[in-house]
Image: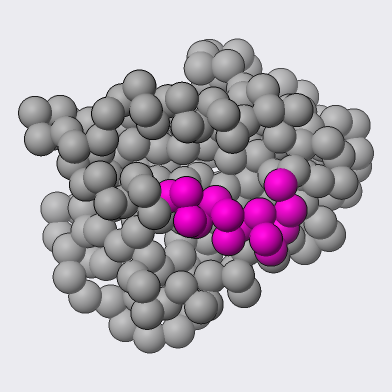
Amino acid sequence: MARKKLKVVMLGEGRVGKTSLLHRFVHNSFDEECPSTTKATMYANTKVEVGETTADVSVWDTAGQERYHALGPIYYRDAHGAVLAYDITDKDSFDKVKVWLKELHQVVGENINVVVVGNKCDLERERKVVKKEAEEWAAAHGAQHFLCSAKLGIRVADAFTALVTAIVKSLGTASGVQAGTGNGANAGAYNGGRPASSNQRSKGVKIAPDEGPAREAPPEKKDCSC
């Protein structure tokens, strides 16, 4: 079975639930008291099997607060894919996703696989982001859109596995791909603007628990952002 090492970054404003989404994907758990991230944290060696390929995925959870934006590009480099997250009850968080994508493209180029995640779909009655607008914007930028709930575990695994599947497919038969040797641009990633199908998880995709502790960079954590 072929193996690939992939780097994925989590992007989005503070308090949209990026860390909660990541915890749901990696540990299948949710913490009501989840603190806001004020440093980048890497979750190493989460294994995702896509057909005959085992992807060792390192996911970087980045701080979303404005005062930490300058640090973002440091963690974008050599990423193979990104999860752009917003809160469906916060219109500004969706508007800022457009800024995050532009910044990501400036650092790694436009040929990078991306999924857009509208978190907190369990709060549908409080929705402030028009679903059709979000879906059309994502499609226009070659990204698949998912409505998720980190709290209830709705479609979180689907979003991550669709991204990993798209990355693996875009890298094709290249062997020994390392996070740090270049992003999907080198292998025609982004599927020419065609996102992965919504039922990727049912097509031979398996997830294994991470095999190592999270590794962190700079300061503390505070506030709740579940």
Specify start and end residues of the magenta stretch as a single range: 97-110
Q: Tell me the quarter of the picture where residue 24 sits.
A: top left
| Furthest-bottom residue in this view | 219
Counting from the top left corner in percent of width and height, residue 207 is at 53, 34
Asked whether residue 109 is drawn in magenta, I would say: yes
Q: Nearer the viewer, residue 21 or 141?
A: 141
Instruction: Name the residue rendered at 45%, 65% in the picture.
Output: 62
Residue 143 lies within the magenta run: no
Q: Position of residue 37 (x, y in %)?
A: 33, 69
State which quadrant residue 165 falls in. top right
Whether residue 48 is visible, yes or no, is no
List x then y, in percent, for residue 11: 46, 55
The residue shown at (62%, 25%) is: 195
Q: In front: 115, or 222? A: 115
Identify which residue is drawn at 28% across, 76% down: 221
Principal SS element in the magenta part?
Answer: helix
**Residue 52, can we see it?**
yes
Image quadrant in which the N terminus is located: top right
* Residue at screen point 34% across, 36% down: 118
| Residue 46 % position (x, y) | 56, 47
Residue 126 as seen in the image, left or right of residue 154: left
